[in-house]
Image: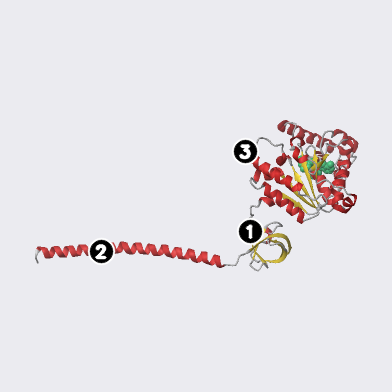
Amino acid sequence: MSLSDSNNKINEKFNSEEEINYLRERVRYLTQLRISLERDLEYYKQELSKLLETPYIEAMLLEVLDKDRAIVKSSTGPNLVVKIGSNVDIKKLRPGVSVALNNKGSTIVEILPNIYDPFVEAMEIDERPQLSFKDVGGLEGQIREIYEVVGLPILNPKLFKDIGIDPPHGVLLYGPPGTGKTLLARALAGEVKANFIRIVSSQFVNKFIGEGARIVREVFRLARERKPSIVFIDEIDAIGSRRMEMGTSGDREVQRTLLQLLAEIDGFDSLDTVKIIAATNRIDLLDPALLRPGRFDRIIEVPLPNKEGRKEILEIYVKKMRTKDFDIEYVAEITEGLSGAEIKAIATEAGFFAIRQKSRYVTMEHFVKAVDKVKKRVERKKQIFGMQI
Ligand SMILES: Nc1ncnc2c1ncn2[C@@H]1O[C@H](COP(=O)(O)OP(=O)(O)OP(=O)(O)O)[C@@H](O)[C@H]1O
Ligand SMILES: [Mg+2]
């Protein structure tokens, strides 16, 4: 064998080894490619099957009827009686949760996670509150006025039409915290059998930037849908403060919300059975635009109760308690300066003192201790928050 021959052989061998290596690499690469393409294929298959699936229907649970039936409000409108799927945990089916119905809409198949809905979170609907004016102590004048300007027009709009006067669109309640503003509005709704829709202004201003105006619109749409109804706007100073320089985007948002609210009030037919009641502790901060005629043009002060008022409030809460030698005059005397909410707290605290002492009755000693405790609490609050609490 010549030298060149052997060289050729070596070359050949070398070539084929290189080639083998190359081919091995290639196989490895192609295997990987295949795996990755198979993965893609699987993914697209799944996506495709998702796209072909019929959708579930979202609904809100209103009430569980028995262990396998419930009433839901479908997102398309009507209330439906549906079956409860066997794999759904019935204990978690509370009124208000979102559920998925199968595509025929006949069965609850899943409980959905709580969906963020600013509209629902910022308000609370009370269908015909089970309260009456008997539950409100010491506000006779305020009760009469709110009944005349909001209650009567709901009960009897024709009366106003015949006489030819326009009842006010809105009423504003103002006064210190805990004096019964919310209670009064609720009791009125109970008396005239109206739905009570409450929105807490500070809540949606803080939490739902960019949503305030929409929420106001939605609330009034709902109120019209559910006539007769009372829209109660709590802490209205949070959206209706006197216009400041529009510094931050938050301020501008508050402004937009206020303008929407004014537009809604202006668009009201005063003979309609939708009424607005607003409440605030800080009437001094309110934008005068809110107080113009045709808006909140009736302003009702709800002050701290006088002695007579305190007696009436005490009566409401003490009536339900088992007491001994209860001296209402005396308790009314020593609770000067306290609000209705604080007087209610005194009754509860007195009950606790009695329970702690294993007493069968709530005695004057318990009441006096309770007054002391609540007064101290009020003092502390004043120190922390200043006079404006
Ligand atoms: N005049 C009252 N008669 C009977 N109960 C009262 C009265 N005032 C307050 N209460 C009791 O105190 C609770 C709190 O009162 P309410 O929420 O109505 O006060 P408010 O004036 O709306 O206070 P805030 O300004 O802090 O919202 C009521 O649910 C009620 O139990
Ligand atoms: Mg209130």
Q: Where is residue 36 in the image (x, y as percent from the top left)?
A: 42, 62
The quadrant in which the N terminus is found is bottom left
* Residue 24 as seen in the image, left or right of residue 114: left
Q: Quadrant of the C terminus?
A: top right
Find residue 298 and report its image quarter: top right
Q: Circle 3: is it few (<14), some (14-19), or many (20+) Cα within 10 Å?
A: few
Look at mark 1 in the image and give the residue it sits on.
Answer: 112
Residue of label 2: 19
Q: Quadrant of residue 80?
A: bottom right
The answer to whether residue 352 is seen in the rendering is no
- Per the image, the residue denoted by label 3 is 248
Q: Which residue lies furthest to the left in this view?
A: 2
Place of residue 58 in the rendered image (x, y in percent of width and height, measured from the top left): 65, 61
Answer few, some or many: residues within 10 Å of disc 2's Cα (few below 14, many 20 plus, some between 14 and 19): few
Q: Is mark 3 on a helix, strand or loop?
A: loop
Secondary structure beneath dot 2 equals helix
Residues at marks 3 and 2, CA–CA distance in whole angstroms: 71 Å
